[in-house]
Amino acid sequence: MDAAHTTVTPVVWMPETVQEAYALYQEYFPDAEWIAGGTWRQVEREKGRAFTGNVIVLERISGLASLQEEEKYVRIGACMTLEQLIENPVISREILGETLRRIAAPAVRTRGTIGGNIMYGHGDALPALIALQAELEIWNGESYACIPVEEAASYDGVFLLTAVLLPKTLEKGPDEVHFFEKIGRREAFTASLLAVSGCIRRQGGGSIRARLALVGGKDAPVRLRRAEACVAEPGWTPESFFEALAADYQPEDEPFSSGNYRLQAAAHLFLSHLWLEDKAEKGGVHKT
Ligand SMILES: Cc1cc2nc3c(=O)[nH]c(=O)nc-3n(C[C@H](O)[C@H](O)[C@H](O)COP(=O)(O)OP(=O)(O)OC[C@H]3O[C@@H](n4cnc5c(N)ncnc54)[C@H](O)[C@@H]3O)c2cc1C
């Protein structure tokens, strides 16, 4: 066998604390990586990205695999699996529950974690968490900190994700809608080309208070602040929304979808909730 095809068997570390997991990573970096459920990393390995020499498994760290209800938020340990969260009554009634039910297949959801979904950078949970104003609890080697989900990709430094802090939503009235939509190359069991989510409240005169976010292809997740500002204006139209969305989101072409396709698809998915649902309720659009 030539040297290029020699596989190195990694050393597997099983730390029991967050601090130990972080210290191991620092000690062996760049030849080290954290692994939670391993479902995403295994696919990457099959695509040719070998494991580093030191694999630091997070599953024995207590506190990363449990959920606690606090007064204003739910603390979700980063190593909770997607399936555990789907089964949890607090999560299942939120739009996050609907989002998780639509990720992959049961076998992946039984191993795959919420932390892994966030940290691989393009997981479907990201836009829903941004729309719901969730924050990430992280350990940065010196202290714990909380950062908005949308800031994770641009965080200056390495961090271990320890939990997701999900604000408790109040009982939703008829004017409040939470939604999640995704499109992929197949109907199910496939990574999505685009996932969008929003939490919206209709106000007088057609204006909408909204938090909107998306993740598409290899792009980092985006909170759509210009699109949110657009729909807050009473006289907004689908055309003005599209312009604002295009200012927020400039996707590149990728092998299975052009940037323009993802932009157009995102506009249609958002408008189906922001515009058509409202018009249909008022009888302006035929709804079957
Ligand atoms: C067949 C198949 C279908 C899939 N379909 C979907 C889909 O529809 N939607 C979707 O969103 N995803 C999908 N995935 C991707 C993925 O498996 C899931 O998103 C899963 O939640 C990843 O979690 P994991 O624990 O397995 O991550 P891992 O593979 O263990 O880790 C993923 C990355 O995150 C890092 N990481 C993990 N935990 C932490 C932490 N606590 N702190 C810092 N870094 C961390 C790891 O270092 C690694 O880089 C699919 C995967 C497969 C195999």
Image (spheres, grey):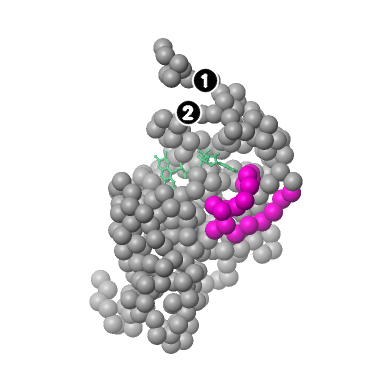
Residue 15's spot in the image, x, y percent?
68, 32
Q: Relative to residue 167, is residue 86 drawn left or right?
A: left
Residue nearest the viewer, comparing 214 with 27: 27
Q: Nearer the viewer, residue 200 or 33?
A: 33
Badge 2 crowding class, 10 Å Cα cut-off, few under 14, some 14 to 19, many 20 or more, is some
Contact, mark 1 vs mark 2 (Cβ under 8 Å)? yes
* Residue 98 location (% of width, % of height): 45, 57
Residue lying furthest top: 1
Q: Which residue is mark 1?
A: 8
Where residue 158 sits, quadrant-wise, is top right
Residue at image position (71%, 50%) is: 144
Is 154 covered by the magenta stretch?
Answer: yes
Name the residue furthest bottom. 205
Residue 57 in view of the camera: no
Q: Label 2 sits on what residue type?
A: Ala
- Residue at x-position 40% and y-position 54%: 216
| Residue designated by label 2 | 50
Which residues lie in the magenta part? 143-166
Q: Nearer the viewer, residue 146 or 288?
A: 146
Depth check, front residue: 252 or 103: 252
Kindly identify the amino acid type of the residue bearing the numbered disc 1.
Val
Q: Label 1: how many residues lie within 10 Å, few (<14), some (14-19) or many (20+)?
A: few
The image's mark for residue 71 is: none
Q: Quadrant of residue 182?
A: bottom left
Where 115 falls versus 43 (above or below)? below
The residue shown at (54%, 52%) is: 153
